[in-house]
Each structure stands twice: as C-alpha cells, then as structure tokens.
Image (spheres, grey):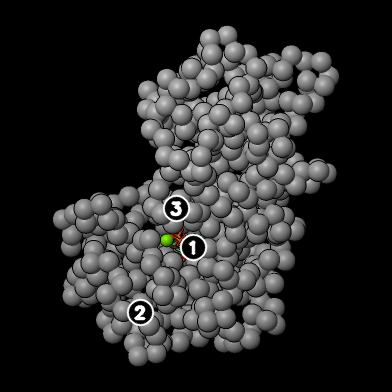
Amino acid sequence: MVLNFLTDIFRRGPRQREVLPSASVKRVATKQKKSATPSLNLNLRIIPREKHNISRKNISSGALRVLYRLNEAGYQAFLVGGAVRDLLLDGHPKDFDIATDATPEQVKSLFRNCRLIGRRFRLAHVMFGPEVIEVATFRGLSDDGTGDRHIVDGRLIRDNVYGGIDEDAIRRDFTVNALYYDIADFSVRDYTGGFEDLTRRELRLIGDPEQRYREDPVRMLRAVRLSAKLGFTIAPDAQAPFATLGALLAEAPPARLFDETLKLFLAGHGLASFRRLDETGLLQEIFPLTAKSLVRSGEDNLRNLIEGALKNTDARVREGKSVTPAFLFATLLWGAVRAMAQRAVTAGTDPGVAWQNASDRVIAEQVARVAIPRRFSITVQEIWALQPRFEQRSRKRVFRLLTHPRFRAAYDFLVLRAVESPQIKELAQWWTDALALPEHELAERLGVNSLAPPPLASTVDDGPKKKRPRRRRAKRPAIADGAPTPPDADNE
Ligand code: ATP
Ligand code: MG
C-alpha cells in the first residue's frame, strides 16, 4: 500500500521532473517489515541566511523561544509551512508552526506551558499568553503494517507515524508550503523546489496532482485560497484536475468545508477567492445554489451584490473590524432564496409562506455541503425575513423594525441590495435618511397614521451635509456580530 502511495507521489509528468529531477524513492521496506521507513532521496537545496530575507525580528518571540529551546535540547527545530512562505514574501504570518524531530512527549517535557492535542496525529501546543505555537513532530510516510497509515480508495484515513524531515516535506500540499527555516543556522531548506516556485509566484503540488487531490479533495480549495491570498497562479497541472475531481468535494466533511469557507471569504481576500472559485468551477461544488443563481440570465445584479459585500468584508478585515459568517451566507444564498420564493409566489403561494419555505429549503440544501452552525443560519434567515418589512413604513412598523435585534444586519443587507433595482435603491436611501434623524423627529415626520412612505429625503436634505444631532437607538446592534457594512452606514 505504501509502495503504491510513494510511487504515486513521485509519478510525475515531464514538467514536474524538471523541478525535481532526482526525486526517487529508495524503498527497502515492505509491508511486512515493521520498522521499515522509506528513505527518500530528494533534491535538497539549502538557501543560506545571506541568500534569503527571513529576519528573526519578524518571527514572534514565542516561536523563537520554542525553536531555541528545542535546539538547545539537541533536537532539530524548524519554522515551517505558511509562516516561512509568508516571511519570504515579506508578509506577516498569522501563525507560526514548528516542525521537529522531538516527539510530542519530549516537547512537553521541555515546556511547562505546553499541552498535547489531537488523536489522529499528536501535536504539542505551547502557549505564550494568547499566542499558541503549534509544534509537530516530523510526519512519516511509512506504513509499518500495523495500520498506522491507511489509504482507502486513494484517501488518507489515519496517520500517526513519525518520520524524517524529507518525508515530512513531501506529505505537505504545495511546494511553497514545504520550506523549512532552520534555527540552527538560519538557512532555509527546500526539498521540493518551493523556493523557486515562490519567486515564480506559482502554486505547484508536491507529487502527482490527481493522487494528492484524491487523498484530500480540500487541497483544491486550498489551491484557490492560497492563489487568492498570495496573488499566485495555480500551476496548470494542479488546476487541470479540478474539472474532473472537483466533485469529490461533495464528500468532504461539511464541518471542514465550513472552516475552509471562512478562510476563503473572511480572511481579507474574499473577493479574489470568490472570483477564482467561480472561474475554476469549484464554486459549483461548495455553493451549488449560488453558482446556479449566478448563471441564470439577468443575474448580474446578484454578482454585483455578492462582490460588493465581499469588497466591504475585505475592507473591514483590513481595518481590523469584525466580520460575521451570517452576513456572508445571507449574501451568497440570496439569489437562490429570492428565485425560489418568487417562483412560489407566482404560483399563488402566500408570500410569507413562500419566503419561509424557500429560506428553510435553501439552508437545508446548503448545510449538506458546508455545515453552517445554527447560530449563524438563524441569523441568515432573520436577515432575509426582515427584507420585506423594510417596505412597510408606517410609524408603528418602522419603530418596531428599528428595535429588532437583527435590524442592523438586515439594513446593511438592504443597502447592498440597492444594486437590484431603482426601487430598492430608493428604499435603502429612505432608511438611511430615517436613521440619520433624531428619534423624535423621525416619529414626527412619519405621523401617527402615515401609511404611505413619507418623503424623508426631501425634507431631511435641506442643506448640503448639515450635521444633525444623532438619534440614539435603544437597541443598536445586530451589527454587534460584525456584519460587513457599507462604509457610510458604518460611520453614521
Ligand atoms: P495560512 O497562511 O492560511 O495559514 P498555511 O499554508 O499556513 O496558510 P495551514 O492550514 O495553516 O495553511 O497549514 C499549515 C501547513 O500545513 C501548510 O503550509 C502545509 O504545509 C500543511 N498542510 C495544511 N493542510 C494540508 C493538506 N490538506 N495537505 C497537505 N499539507 C497540508
Ligand atoms: Mg498557517
């Protein structure tokens, strides 16, 4: 089994062979030999300190302390993964992962502030206040016959075998994610050609792309996410299998896809992720309803709405503001819920019932792919359910809506919907004007029995940008959970 796996990893086309010319497997073990580990002969390239730009001052003090202590205790200690990649790109890593030849228990014995986690693969977490440094023992590729490593139908089921640094390197996903910063001499070790790929700004899978995606289909989403985050291209042979293997994402655990969705959309590069998912056809695999509603004719406004929301979200992330998954899902699934409800209304269903049913069905269909925790899906449904209520502008209804706990998120959503039609734009403007009024003034203008939408804008706008006293709303923030808001709305 292992032999197959290794052969598969190194089954390369001509392009890959160029980069890893001498990649070969010196395999002496068989499944029966218990202690056998494969020894790899990779093309190790060591980039000395003076040939790269990683400076210790950009590495967190916690990570440095762990690296040094491991090293002083006689173990190998490397910074690895996204941190090395981002440091080489002059970026600021959001977390620092460490790889070592010390076992988790040995790591634990060196640090008081350490706990071991994970059943499938034990990891050490070393805590420095809010910072958690993850320390992983080099992972191996070997199957010693006891079932430590299982590949069923080409998919990785269980692995808890330790290995050497070379094995650890080739089980990673992209070459640019398999670079090791050595605390012993501050050099960078490159076993898979990642350093060169980094300069070419290309994401290349380690091993045979098809095999690696079959093992773990989420790697396709990681390719899209990293290409969006870093502005890298995906190597043609890494992108080609999306068309045939994208469907495997349907079998990925929905909870994992939820985490991946947040990383795609709420980490500051949501717009780029969305566009790349759409271009590569993977949107269809994780948000089938969204993809379908986008191709429906005349849905340009939906694309604008989604892109507008993601642009706001990216801006909020850059400014360090909070963002909420609920608003994201409300946006991505809006086209589907709207179309479904409208179809039912046209067929004669009561609008309230039609919207409720559509909203339940859309959420149910989506959670089969991407698990949306209840606390978020409830908010998504509330945001949708409040949309028709913005049209009711009698005094009583306006004030009731203003105190709804999800008012703010629903209002922000209405503002986004302004791209849908001139009527919605006008409606959103009416509410924006209403929010700018002090409460007593709004009440006065709405009148006791006013049913027709009062022309707030014309009465409100009686001078160029005149500052008016701010009205305090009793319950401000549905926005408390951080809906991405249009900049104006946010400032008011
Ligand atoms: P980010 O900056 O978004 O954290 P990252 O590359 O650090 O990107 P992580 O999810 O933190 O992503 O993973 C850390 C490292 O673990 C990766 O750089 C990669 O080497 C390895 N890795 C993560 N997921 C996989 C996977 N599905 N298959 C193989 N290797 C993986
Ligand atoms: Mg990371």
Which of 438/350 is in front? 438
Give the mark nearest the N terminus, 2 or 1: 2
Whether label 1 lies within 8 Å of ligand 1 gets the answer no
* Whole-percent x, y for residue 124 in the image: 29, 56
Instruction: Name the residue beneath numbered marker 1.
Output: 143
Q: How crowded is mark 1: few (under 14 residues within 10 Å), some or many (20 or more)?
A: many
Give the mark nearest the N terminus, 3 or 2: 2
Q: Can residue 300 be seen in this view?
A: yes
Kind of element beneath mark 2: loop
Which of 277/403 is in front? 403
Q: Are marks 2 and 1 in contact (CB under 8 Å)?
A: no
Type of amino acid under label 2? Ile
- Identify the disc placed on residue 317: 3
Instruction: Name the residue beneath numbered marker 2.
Output: 54
User: Which residue is depicted at the point 32% across and 62% down?
Assistant: 135
Q: Nearer the viewer, mark 3 or mark 2?
A: 3
Q: Which of marks 3 and 1 is in front?
A: 3
Give the mark nearest the N terminus, 3 or 1: 1
* Whole-percent x, y for residue 160 in the image: 42, 57
Type of amino acid under label 3? Val
* Whole-percent x, y for residue 42 in the image: 50, 82
User: Which residue is depicted at the point 65% across and 73% down?
Assistant: 235
